[in-house]
Amino acid sequence: MLIIGVGNTAMDCCRTSLRLGAKSVKVMARKPRGFFKASEWELEDAEEENVEIVVNHAPKAFVVEGGRLKGMTFEQLEYDMEGGEIRGQRVLGEVFVPCDDVILAIGQENAFPWVERDLGIEFDRWDVPKVDPVTFESTRPGVFFGGDAAFGPKNIIWAVEHGHQAAISIHKHCCGEPLTARLPRGVNLQSRKVGMNEWSYKNDYDAAARRLVPHVSLKERFRKLNIEVELGFDADRAAEEVGRCLNCDIQTVFHASLCIECDACIDICPTDCLTITANGEEADVVARLKAPRRNPDQPLFVSEPLKQTARIMVKDEDLCVHCGLCAERCPTDAWDMQKSWIEIPHAEDEAPCPSVTRTLRRA
Ligand code: SF4
Ligand code: SF4
């Protein structure tokens, strides 16, 4: 059995094939592993079940003899890589891989045969409707699209958000209001301090690695189609895993005017992500950080000049584990741990249409 494609659907296909009696299953991937669309844990689970994932093989042809599928030919590819990107490719040769069955798991295409092309809805070269990325309105006023149909493969979370945004637009369209007049997004912060050194969230830092979810044994899991492979955590193990949460909704908030530059937070920080240093060019400041910067794409937090020496407090958020030790140790409350809420307006936050309000009042 060959599965063409290496997304999460391909992982479902290969594992289901084994459960339906396939003896040997190969997943054929055109690119190297770093470019697979499947989640790493899905790949691991498939490989645990002895599915072979063959990289750098581009499908070329089905080989049929006497009306029966004998296998497929593939071009063996080699890639030129630079900085994690593919810069070029060449064909090394052609190989024949025998098989009885092939499942194509290479995604789906949009199909809009039911949309007449003279309605004023324009489509791009991928046959996807042209959609405004803010209002989700197509080129025909009052017709809206979202999800994969409008933007290509994303995930269900994006599709739901597109639905929310399109709902706002539809409401405005029905009210005769401009679709682009959106309510602003907002962020709220509130201190989590509930005592001298206490926070209303669990902030013990547990450096333990992620525990793997226990699985049904390899022998057992193929007995029936409806056996759930992942057993889940028991209550104690689940509590331990929850304790590893890095509380990314709790932010370290710094008040430069309160800092007396005692260095206590610098000394206590378990990840060395705080540095007090002279201001300067970014490359120069980065060279003076207490811990090397791991993610240059993430901006550093840089404070206002501190009162006593005009130096700056620098924080590398990429390294912070939100343990709150800096805020606990700080004698002046210059650091605080604050919970953040992101407010994204939805259709329910919109005012009713004025015409509807008038109608209701009359009634
Ligand atoms: S919350 Fe913890 S890891 Fe983050 S800056 Fe403060 S002490 Fe360092
Ligand atoms: S512990 Fe507080 S006062 Fe001391 S250096 Fe850090 S932020 Fe400033």
Image: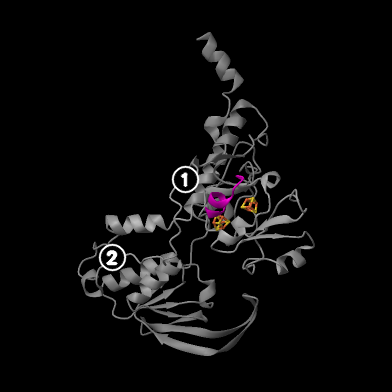
Residue at horizontal 67%, vertical 48%? Answer: 259
Q: Nearer the viewer, residue 339 or 204?
A: 204
Pinpoint residue 16: horizontal percent, then vertical percent. 31, 68
Closer to viewer: mark 2 or mark 1 = 1
**Dot 2 and dot 1 residues touching (CB under 8 Å):** no
Classify mark 1: helix, strand or loop: strand
Left/right placement of residue 226 relative to residue 63 reads left
Residue range (magenta): 325-333
Check residue 328 for magenta coloring.
yes
Ligand 1 position by quadrant: bottom right
Q: Nearer the viewer, residue 171 or 142?
A: 171
Pinpoint residue 136: horizontal percent, then vertical percent. 61, 43
Pinpoint residue 57: horizontal percent, then vertical percent. 50, 81
Q: Seen from this angle, which residue lies furthest right? A: 281
**Quarter containing the N terminus:** bottom left
Pinpoint residue 179: horizontal percent, then vertical percent. 65, 35
Residue 233 vertical placement versus 133 (above, below)? below
Residue at horizontal 63%, vertical 41%? Answer: 135
Left/right placement of residue 105 relative to residue 89 reads left
Instruction: State the scheme by which the image is colored.
Output: one colour
